[in-house]
Structures are given as C-alpha cells and as structure tokens.
Image: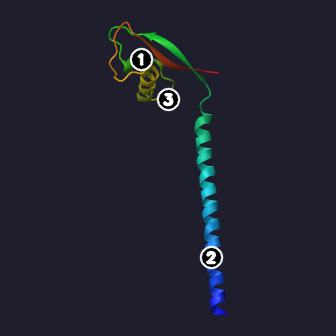
Amino acid sequence: MDGRRRRRMVRKSKKARKNVLVLLTLALIVGLGTIAMGAQGGKEGSVCYESVLIHTGDTLWSIAEEYKSEGEKTEHMIDDILKLNGIKTTKIRSGEHILVPVEKAS
C-alpha cells in the first residue's frame, strides 16, 4: 500500500507541475502580447511618402534628420529610406529623387 500511495503522490506532483508550467506559459504569452500592443498603441499617425529631390551637399543623414518624426532615431529613418528605395549604399547623387516616409498626424 505504501508503494501505491507514493505513485499516486508522484502522479499528482507531475500533474501539478504540468499545470503550473501551462499557466506560466499562458501568462508569458499574455504579457508579451500586452507589451506588443502597447508599443503599437503609441503610433497615432499614418505614414505618407514624399518625393525628395537631392541637391548638391545633401546626405541621407541630413535628409533623414529633416523628415524623421519626433523621437525617431535618425539611423532608423535612414534604414527606412534605404529599404523603401531599394538602395544598397548610403551614397546619393544630386538630381536624383528618393521617396521618404513622412508621418502625418491623424
């Protein structure tokens, strides 16, 4: 009888651990989802695109500085411009047009 009781306790213990693991996993998923939704909630404007004519002396850095939204890092804006225009290098030439994402308040 002692062996039977021990096996029963072990099974209950395993079941309890499994339940705790499931609850922790669900809590983690809900927590991460909440964080992700909170990060998206701060974006109130819509993104439009503006064609920019490059002049002599312009750099991607100066263009990104001029058109980036408040609080956005210049490096992120440069990455967005490169991706949007399919540019592989940061070298640009005067006379070219590039598209720049511009956030419009809604």
Q: Which of 101 and 19 is in front in this view?
A: 19
- Quick one: label 1 or label 3, which is nearer the N terminus? 1
Location of residue 41 with respect to 21 vertically, above or below: above
Q: Dividing the picture into quarters, in which one does residue 106 lie?
A: top right
Distance from the alpha carbon under mark 1 to that under mark 2: 62 Å
Contact, CB < 8 Å: mark 1 with mark 2? no
What numbered label is drawn on residue 71? 3
Name the residue tied to disc 2.
13
Location of residue 67 with respect to 94 vertically, above or below: below
Quarter containing the N terminus: bottom right
Look at the numbered disc 2 and give the secondary structure of its residue: helix
Residue drawn at x 37%, y 6% is 95
Distance from the alpha carbon under mark 1 to that under mark 3: 16 Å
Q: Dividing the picture into quarters, in which one does residue 97 lie?
A: top left
The answer to whether residue 103 is left or right of residue 86 is right
Residue drawn at x 62%, y 28% is 44
Foreground label between 1 and 3: 1
Location of residue 29 with respect to 49 vertically, above or below: below
Name the residue tied to disc 1.
63
Amino acid type of disc 1?
A: Ile
Q: At which x and y percent is residue 28?
A: 59, 54
Amino acid type of disc 3?
A: Gly
Indicate how the structure is coloured in the image.
Answer: rainbow
- Quick one: label 3 or label 2, which is nearer the N terminus? 2
